[in-house]
Amino acid sequence: MSETLSIQQKAQLIDKYRQQISSIKEYDLEARYKIGNIFNDIKDRKLYLGYGEHIRSFNDLLEEPEFSIDGKKGRRSTVYNMMGIAKKLELDELKRIGSYERSVRLLPYLKENKEKIVEEVEGLPREAFEDYLRKLKNLTPTDECSHTNQDEYKVIKCRDCGKILEMKKVS
């Protein structure tokens, strides 16, 4: 069942959303998720048409200073990324991925196997995450090699910092 709102109702609702967005002071994962959901609702229900006669599209609304993100006007890509994350992920999945930036980089791949991807990237260190992305892009990860000519090495590594202290070729 679709809901039909008058221009006045749209104006009231979009003003409520504007106030919610402007009240956000820290852009953590939950705040970005909330903003994404707000903008999804504004766009899906065409609430922007109730904001003013000069607003004819969703992108026009994003240019309005009152809808700026982090005090910066016209951050369309940021808003669209927040919207994509809110549409494709649940909040708990976003938290499991661990960062907004990682979630944005995973957006193109979340259409299929979302649960598997979230599970596999949870807790990955930066280098491992970068390699995981390379695999998703069908590129060779930096920790893999397709060559058959290989040498074996004995590696002595610090358990605290991970620094390689010594590396000797095994004969």
Image (tube, rainbow, N blue to C red):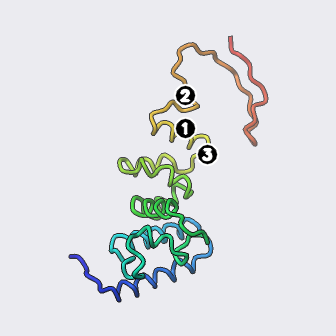
How crowded pointer 3 is (Cα within 10 Å; few <14, some 14-19, many 20+) is rated as few
Secondary structure of residue under mark 1: helix
Q: Quadrant of the N terminus?
A: bottom left
Secondary structure of residue under mark 3: loop
The residue singled out by tag 3 in the image is 125
Earlier sequence position, callout 1 versus callout 2: 1
How crowded pointer 2 is (Cα within 10 Å; few <14, some 14-19, many 20+) is rated as few
Kindly identify which numbered label has been placed on residue 144. 2
How crowded pointer 1 is (Cα within 10 Å; few <14, some 14-19, many 20+) is rated as some
Q: How many marks on residues?
A: 3
Q: CA distance from mark 1 to mark 3?
A: 10 Å
Earlier sequence position, callout 1 versus callout 3: 3
Q: Is residue 78 above or below residue 18?
A: above
Amino acid type of the residue tagged 2 in the rendering: Glu
Q: Is residue 161 above or below residue 67?
A: above
Amino acid type of the residue tagged 3 in the rendering: Pro
